[in-house]
Image (cartoon, helix red, strand yellow):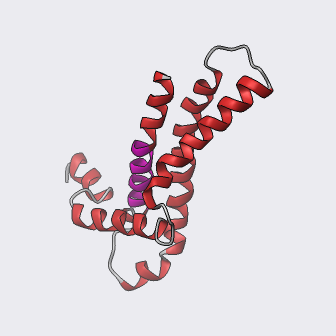
């Protein structure tokens, strides 16, 4: 067995339908009872940017140019990383019953959680781009 075949099998990339359904399930569960739905993915970074702008420009009066943008450009990727790691770990524990009942490749659950968080990252990056333009 070659190395590329092993990586494809480990990351379950040959089961795209499974990954797509797990990602769709994760998104449905996350925004199930939310009034605004997936708009929260955009509103949270926008609200954070506004709060940092007010705090660091008017309250603390930091003299570093574009300091809120500097913080936001680090905060958005860090939020992706921390939520992806936490959700991946919790996916194994939270889906323990599913793993026992269905012959499912174990790495598919953390990978689907990471891909879900990556989708949220892609949806929140326009807020960073808009903040850069302003």
Above or below 101: residue 128: above
Q: Which is more toward the observer, 16 or 79?
A: 79
Please count the marks in the image: 0
| Extreme-bottom residue of the structure | 101
Q: Is 79 covered by the magenta stretch? A: no
Above or below 22: residue 70: above
Q: Which residue: 42% across, 36% down?
A: 126
Side (left or right) of 119 relative to 73: left
Tell me which corner region of the image, top left, top right, bottom left or bottom right, holds residue 79: top right
Residue 73: x, y in percent? 54, 30
Above or below 12: residue 66: above
Q: Which residue: 33% across, 74% down?
A: 104
Residue 59: x, y in percent? 79, 28
Q: Which is more toward the observer, 85 or 33?
A: 33
- Kindly report the secondary structure that dominates the magenta region of the rendered protein: helix
Q: Which residue: 67% across, 37% down?
A: 51
Residue 127: x, y in percent? 47, 36
Q: Which is more toward the observer, 125 or 1?
A: 125
Q: Which is more toward the observer, 43 or 80?
A: 43
Q: Which residue: 62% across, 36% down?
A: 50
Q: Is residue 74 visible?
A: yes
Above or below 126: residue 93: below
Q: Is residue 15 visible?
A: no
The quadrant of the image that shows the N terminus is bottom left
Residue 22: x, y in percent? 35, 67
Q: Is 113 covered by the magenta stretch? A: yes
Q: What stretch of residues is rendered in magenta?
A: 110-123
Side (left or right) of 4 relative to 22: left
């Amino acid at each position: 067995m070659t190395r590329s075949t092993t990586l494809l099998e480990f990351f379950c990339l040959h089961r795209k339908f499974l990954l797509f359904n797990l990602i769709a399930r994760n998104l449905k569960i996350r925004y199930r009872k939310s009034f605004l739905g997936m708009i929260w993915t955009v509103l949270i970074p926008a609200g954070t940017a506004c709060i940092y702008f007010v705090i660091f420009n008017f309250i603390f009066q930091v003299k570093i140019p574009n300091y809120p943008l500097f913080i936001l450009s680090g905060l958005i990727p860090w939020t992706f990383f921390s939520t992806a790691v936490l959700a991946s770990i919790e996916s194994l524990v939270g889906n323990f019953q599913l793993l026992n009942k269905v012959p499912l490749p174990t790495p598919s659950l953390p990978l689907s959680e990471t891909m879900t968080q990556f989708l949220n990252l892609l949806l929140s990056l326009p807020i960073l781009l808009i903040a850069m333009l302003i």
